[in-house]
Image (spheres, rainbow, N blue to C red):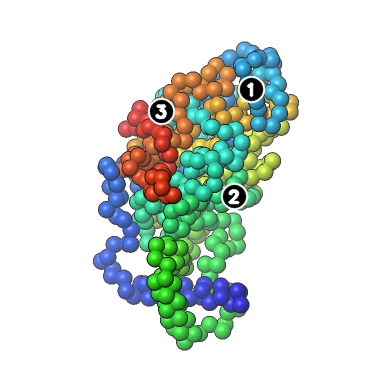
Amino acid sequence: MQQHRRAFLTTNFGSLALSHLLAYSQDEKPRSRAEFNGGLHHRAKAKKVIQIFLNGGMSQMDTFDYKPELEKRHGQQIDVGLKATATGTPGPVMKSPFTWKRHGQCGRYVTDVFPRLAQHVDDMAFLMAMSSKSNVHGPASYLQTTGFQTPGFPCAGAWIAYALGRLSDNLPTFIVLPDSRGLPYNGMGNFSCGFLPTTYQGTVVNPSSPTPIPDLKADPNTRFITPESNEEGLKLLQAINSEYARTRQGDSRLQSRIESYELAAKMQLSAPEAFDLNREPAKIQSLYGIERPHAEGSFARNCLLARRLCERGVRFIQIWSGAGGPANNWDNHVSIPKELPPIAKQVDQPVAALLTDLKARGMFEDTLVIFTTEFGRMPFTQSGTGRDHNGGTFVTWLAGAGIKGGVSYGESDEFSYLAVKNKTTCYDLYATVLHVLGIDHEKLTVRHNGIDRRLTDVHGHVIQSILN
């Protein structure tokens, strides 16, 4: 019975789409909150966001945060007042095993694990003193995606979708592209709509799967569905839904489900074209490196797909690098020299290509790109040449609409152990992101259980020095 019900609903998506399109005037704009595209509280500089999240904790002192003192004190056991580590006992100081070099007119230091991203530093604004309240993956990931360390709160993509609505009537407002090897720590919790209407939940798409979006198409074996049964079924659903809504005033779940069915119906028409990367010229496919094997090619396809989705009006796109678990991510406990280069190589070419492609298409002018992680790593060794979790400092960069390129804000200490100057948090990051989107982070609130909740909780300030 459950299988027949699912088949019935998925098959009826096509009828829903047809009825919607027949009633839709060609002169009418998409059902979106277009009045907010210029800004909810002030004039917006960005309409869309692409967030790249490095699951596991990227090592800042092996990528973007150059510290000569680590080279001078390499191999020494130093007491910096460390109270506790996440998973082990800290060993001696370890310098980065990678080569540092200055890049761009701004002279930003970058190691050779990011040779292609290094070519774009003049477009990036670096937050060099990010910090987290937690050095544990689960709470830290929740904090960086939702502003809270516990589950149940809306993530940034959901808040932005709620505030600004759709730019396209044929694709979701918020799409998540996970690593092909699996979901990150916290699983679906990082993409949650929390207490917001379920319409704003992130839609998870896996382009590497034979069915990127489950249940979008009906099972080909559902031959028992006929035009007559479609019509009868739609009438029955309408009657059931009307009665349900009448007896449950204030419950948004039914309306959200109906909207999701309508969107799924429209996606039957729009998604195949949007997800078809073969429509891209060979030189663009090569630019991203989608022909590369395994996880590298999968991440490259996600980046190219993100550009295509952004181009077609998806408001917020989240790309994940790294699955949850002890391997295949940025959680490099055992060996920085062996573990960091492969995962860095996975993202280097595709993200650099994404920046190049956005600029070439004029999309850099209204698209904000965020490159972040949940925390950093320790300057001390662990398990020989690995590094433990460090919530004290890490690096995030932003580029694109509204962002001043070639600048940095904040500094860590001489060991890249703690943020010491112009310390920033997820609250400051999202206050700034919302500002660029035309939203005052203190005014974007929803009353929940007697509290006016917001993405930035009761914290956060806009980092004006990185804005144009």
User: Which of the two labelled residues, at mark 3 and mark 2, occupies the earlier sequence position?
Assistant: 2
Instruction: Identify the residue position indicated by label 3 in the image.
Output: 406
Looking at the rendered image, the quarter that the N terminus falls into is bottom right
Quadrant of the rendered image containing residue 265: bottom left
Q: Is residue 267 left or right of residue 206?
A: left
CB atoms of marks 3 and 2 within 8 Å: no
Of circles 3 and 2, the one toward us is 2
The amino acid type, in three-letter code, at marker 1 is: Lys
Q: Residue at x 40, y 52 (%)?
A: 161
Name the one closer to the observer, 467 or 207. 467
Name the one closer to the observer, 331 or 139. 139
User: Which of the two labelled residues, at mark 3 and mark 1, occupies the earlier sequence position?
Assistant: 1
The amino acid type, in three-letter code, at marker 3 is: Gly
Extreme-right residue of the structure: 384
Q: Which mark is residue 83?
A: 1
* Vertical order, 294 against 106 (above or below): below
Quadrant of the rendered image containing residue 333: top right
Quick one: label 2, few (<14), some, or many (20+) residues within 10 Å?
some
Q: Which mark is residue 187?
A: 2
Observer able to see residue 204: yes
Q: Is residue 287 left or right of residue 173?
A: right
* Vertical order, 450 against 392 (above or below): below
Q: Position of residue 74 (x, y in %)?
A: 66, 16
Observer able to see residue 367: no
Name the one closer to the observer, 276 or 95. 95
User: Which of the two labelled residues, at mark 2 and mark 1, occupies the earlier sequence position?
Assistant: 1
In the rendered picture of this protein, how many numbered marks are placed on residues? 3
Give SS at disc 3: loop
Q: Residue at x 56, y 56 (%)?
A: 206
Of circles 3 and 1, the one toward us is 1
